[in-house]
Image: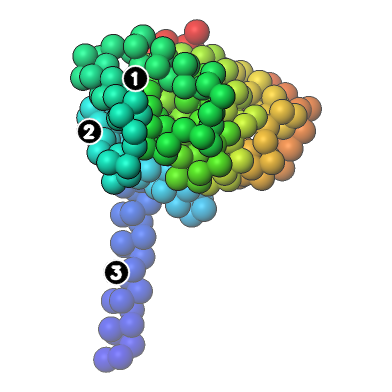
Amino acid sequence: MKTRYLVLAVAAVGGLAWYSSWALKSGDGENQSPNVIVGHDRRADGGVDAKSRKHAKRITKIRDEKSTMSKEKPVFDFDDEANLNEEQRALIAKIREALDDEDKKTVLRLVQKMQKSDEWPDGIPKAVKMAAIEAMGWFGLGCLPEIVGFLADGDQEVVQSTLEKLEEAISDMDLSDRDRSSILMQVAKVVNDSDTMDSILFELNNMRHSVAVATIKELMVSGSDATKSVLPDNVEFYTGEEGLDTPEKLDKWLEENPDDEDDEDYYGGAKD
């Protein structure tokens, strides 16, 4: 009797494993996050290992959460705002008003003036800086240089908020892959948070092969230490191969995996 139950248990586990594998490979595309599991399946000839699935699941969760949050116009209210002087409170009020009016030019003008002041960055109250970051993050890519400027701040909460906005901006699915590559390379030079860069490098999956390989080769040279530390795992996930750690190996991989004619369907949006 015990033997019979054991056989049935093994069969059940085997059936569950088969179903899970089938579901990963043949799930409805509308129910999957774009350019994640499907993309890796194509590059790795029909399968993702457990490490890659775990990586994709974590990044997809982060992306989904931030995508939902970024669609909503932020309403910011800071505990230390009451301690600001009249001029500083007026500045936050102007930022709020410009955001309500969707007036990006005014937000940028206020932030640029702030960044040129003698008090920049650590002499500016955190509440003012956080208000600016929230507003610019909602506008996205059009504020990228100004957002990057907040990475020089001495307050880690300000820096972390800045990193989150950068990640949201670079995840914009309307970007062409060349624009995405250009922004990724800019960010990868200055971001020194490995977890953030691990997530940002997932954008390689939103570029066609030739652009992604060119990007990886540049990151090997100019990327920050944080970028270089997580680049191997992301390259392995993108290509499905280990040890592609030199430009020559990447060029050989590209020869064997040229751009597909249907990349427009796969990646979505404009490619150039």
* Residue 229 appearing in the image: yes
Residue plotted at (62% across, 32% down): 190
* Circle 3 crowding by C-alpha within 10 Å: few under 14, some 14–19, many from 20: few
Q: For the residues carrying marks 2 and 1, which lies nearer the camera in this image?
A: 2
Picture coordinates of residue 123, whole percent (x, y): 51, 34
Task: State which quadrant residue 133 falls in.
Answer: top left
Residue at horizontal 42 percent and vertical 39 percent from the top: 126
SS class of the residue under badge 2? loop
Q: Residue at x 28, y 11 (%)?
A: 103
Q: Earlier in the sequence, mark 2 or mark 3?
A: 3
Image quarter where the N terminus lies is bottom left
Q: Amino acid at mark 1?
A: Phe
Residue 264 image point, x, y percent: 42, 14
Of 116 and 19, nearer the camera is 116
Specify the quadrant of the image occupied by residue 168: top left
The kind of residue on which mark 2 rests is: Val
The residue carrying mark 1 is 139
Element under label 3? Answer: helix
Measured as percent of width and height from the top left, residue 235 is found at 61, 37
Mark 1: secondary structure: helix
Report the residue marked by disc 2.
75
Please indicate, yes or no, whether residue 258 appears anywhere in the rendered image: no
Residue picked out by circle 3 = 12
